[in-house]
Amino acid sequence: MDLTNYFEIAAMILFGIGLTLLLLNRNMIKKIIGFSMTDSAIFLYLAAKGYISGRKAPIVTDGITAAEAYVNPIPSGLVLTGIVVSVAGSAVLLALTVRLYRMYHTLDLDEITDKARKGGR
Amino acid sequence: MARRLDPKGQSLYARFLRYLSEGDDRLDREVMHAVDAPPAQPAAETVKAPELPARVPEAVVRRHTRAARIFYLVAAALMAAGISLLLILTTTDLPSFGDDGNPVNNEVVRRYLEDGMRETGSVNLVTGMILDYRAFDTLGESNVLFTAACAVMILLRAGNREERIEIEADERMENRNQDPILQTVTRLLVPLILMFGCYVILNGHLSPGGGFSGGAVLGAAMILYLNAFGSGSAGRFMTLAVHRAVTVTALSFYALSKAYSFFTGANHLPSVITPGTPGNLFSAGLIPYLNICVGLVVCFTMYAFFALFRKGDI
């Protein structure tokens, strides 16, 4: 039992908050906010995994190319990829929500389901 | 089941099926019509429909839905709490934070750090990694952005005339009370922000930054300009044709310039493009040019997202 992984614990708490929002809130916009929070939690987790204490960012300074001088560059690259994909995903989700709102004039997912089932608006 | 609950085929799923079977632009027209049509008419038709007695009685449906909703709420709360607890418990068993001997710090990392600058010519090892060793990954990522911009455009572009007229009326109202403070500050700041964005993109292989962050900065400058001066001024240089030409050219250049890997057996070593002297502006092989491509795609996509959400068109 190791309770010193603060960053990882914080990331998992954030993930839990995001997941709860995603599952329990009926408002579409708040669901999307929850979705973005789970994304951010995963980025925090990955970035924390790549850190090695006492080392520098992986940009070669003074020609030192020893592996012992820099932190792990792979999680940084993965997070870079992830942030962009998360932005794109959020944009598509929000656009779909705008469409749904124009059609049903509500953001409540239950009301939308009801109205869609009845075939009206 | 679906047919009985949805006799007129108005649900999204039914429309999607029709769209698939007919294969033309009917979906869009239908959505437009549904938005435009007066709300009372379809409801009256549903009441008059002859297959009404075959439907499940309203009260039964409502009771079942309420039970299902309560079950869903309880199950969702339990699941969210359970997954969160499980994840937090798992983190206590992970290797400790910041330790050199963690299993993630393996021989791949050693290779990237020790040979990365010599092999890619990039001083910024992260840039060298994502635009040389893993360039296809980044190409896919730029394509994700492009696809997302296309999807948002399909969903939000104002299709019919009434919508467009309404948006233009909004726009005129907005332009009348423009803020002189915002405009002056924008006039001062936008060139600086654009310059900073170009600096971040062009030095992506030398210092922190690169195509993604620099592109986001450039996009922010353009969004600021759009907000201050309205889409009349911004639309003079940012049209749909410009957006399409720039993003497609950038993505094609990226794809073609990385295609040489296929001809050299996916092995970058015998390439005619040399890494150059690490630390120079013109070095690191193709990385600066790929950074410019990625930056342009990111910048235009950010602007497109904002413009589409703001006024339904670029």
Image (cartoon, coloured by chain):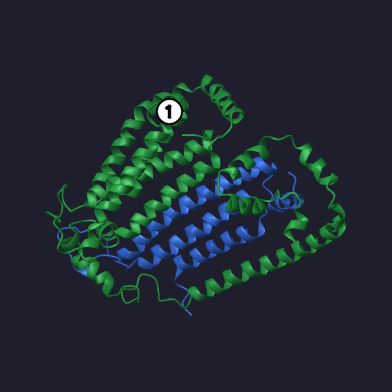
Chain colours: A blue, B green
Viewer can see residue B294: no
| Residue B166: x %, y % from top left | 60, 27
* Residue in the picture at 52% in, 60% down: A38
Q: Chain of mark 1?
A: B
Left or right relative to B55: residue B1: left
The one nearer the camera, A89 or B51, is B51
Residue farthest toward the bottom in the current orientation of the protein:
A1
The one nearer the camera, A57 or B149, is B149
The one nearer the camera, B229 or B263, is B263
| Residue B73: x %, y % from top left | 71, 63
* Residue in the picture at 81% in, 46% down: B46
Residue B214 vs B4, above or below: the answer is above
SS type, badge 1 = helix
The image quadrant where one finds the N terminus of chain B is: bottom right
Left or right relative to B48: residue B23: left
* Residue in the picture at 23% in, 70% down: B111
Q: Using a 10 Å C-alpha cutoff, classify the residue at mark 1 as few (fewer than 14 neighbours), some (14 to 19) or many (20 or more).
A: some
Viewer can see residue B62: yes
Circle 1: residue type: Gly
Q: Which residue in the structure is indicated by mark 1? A: B235
Residue B161 vs B90, above or below: the answer is above
